[in-house]
Image (tube, grey):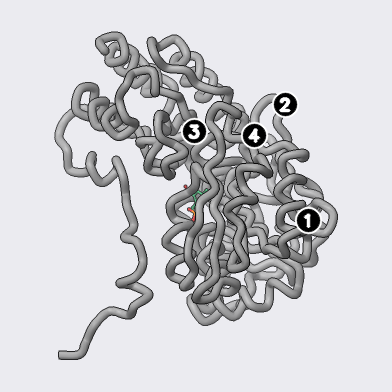
Amino acid sequence: MSIRPARRITDTSPKNFGMFAKAIGMEGDLIHLELGMPAEDTPQHIKDATIAALQAGHVHYSDLQGIPELRSAIAEKLRRQNGLDLLPDEVIVTNGLTQASFAAFMAFLDEGDECLLLAPYYSQHVGKAELAGAKVTIAPLDAADNFSINRALIEPFITPATRAIALINPCNPTGRVYSRAELQTLANIALDNDLLVFSDEVYSDIVYDWATHVSIASLPGMKERTITMGAFTKSHAMDGWRLGYIAADTSLIGPCMKMTSNEVTHVNTFIQYGAVAALTGDPQVLKGMVDRDCARRDLVVTRLNRMPRVTCAPVEGAIYAFPDISATGLTSQECADRLLAETGVVVEAGSFYGSAGEGHLRVCFGCADLPVLEDAMGRMHRFFDTL
Ligand SMILES: Cc1ncc(COP(=O)(O)O)c(C=O)c1O
């Protein structure tokens, strides 16, 4: 029999679900802090607009790139908040950020190309670059320097085959929001080495305190070499809706359109009206959600820093704390496994995000309400007390 999977399947690393896969099906009183699934419900005005669109008969095929109202609203948000000068025709609505990055990687990476990830990295980017035929290379950032973007740590990994760098800003898993100066460093590397930047900005609306999110595409010379990707997933608690977007210069958007239109034709029509409401509705709703994430962050970071042998750097954005547990002498996987077995708290091992994440745990605080987080922190504290 000659039926066999394509080489792009057999040659691609398996998708690893980490601690989620270990915890699933386990009995007992578990607290799940391993997945980035928002605790909030989707705001009511977004649901109402979607239901109204459905009732109004927006149930047919629509614009392949996304409904014009939504593309205009996204372009306007990117202009106002991210300093990006893009037309509605330079936006494609996608099935979450997952489809945006899949389309972008497939559209711009070839067999034999290298795609550089900054580590700790988001593991989904590995599989997608490999599916596109590219080889993934890793530039480990330094935990002791708060995982800052540092030219000396990145440039040695650039070879003549490097085509692109994948950036996550704000960063999952570290909680860093990169400064303008750090992004300028990365932009200079891209400009000097003629590289494309895939900029995953799924957490761009979730920043705290003094942190300001800067889109790397807004820096001089970067618009033509950056594919900016966003989503409603985290900011508007719309993870199940599967709604995101690609925003890029016309020269970059055409190849991405070829991917998305062949792949899914377009995103479900009526939910796009909900996304219009998300962008044009009362901004206080989004602010309220971020404020509640901020309270969750305060509780978790404060409590982690009180635990023996645990130190947690400030979290500037996104919904994760990335505490350093190296003083326990356990590997991050041993620590995550023991936390699950001995306390029922499920967190991800830092090594899941590459060896640069070793010695850390990723604790999602955005996925639970304060009393649950309080319970989880109590259990974790007692665990670290016993070591
Ligand atoms: C950095 C990053 N990119 C992309 C995604 C996936 O986003 P979506 O659910 O919109 O596909 C996530 C989800 O956790 C993420 O953390």
> Does 322 appear above or below 38?
above
Vertical relation: 183 (above or below) 375: below
Q: Which residue, given by chain and number where applicable, does mark 4 sit on?
A: 207
The amino acid type found where label 3 is placed reads Tyr
- Mark 4 or 1: in front is 4
Please state, as top left, top right, bottom left or bottom right, where the C terminus lies in the image: top left
- Badge 2 is on which residue? 210
Q: Amino acid at mark 2?
A: Trp
Q: Residue at x 47, y 18 (%)?
A: 311
Q: For residue 283, which quarter of the picture? A: top right
Calculate the distance from the C-alpha at mark 4 to the C-alpha at mark 1. 20 Å
Q: Nearest the camera: 157 or 293?
A: 157
Sequence order check, earlier mark of 1 and 3: 1
Q: Is residue 177 left or right of residue 318?
A: right
Which residue appears at 70% of the width and 31% of the height? 211
Asked if the residue at label 4 sits under 8 Å from ligand 1, the reply is: no
Give the spatial CA distance, label 2 vs label 4: 8 Å
- Is label 3 in contact with label 4 (beta carbons under 8 Å)? no
- Across and down, in percent, residue 267 comes to 53, 69
Return the residue at label 1: 76
The CA distance from mark 1 to mark 2 is: 24 Å
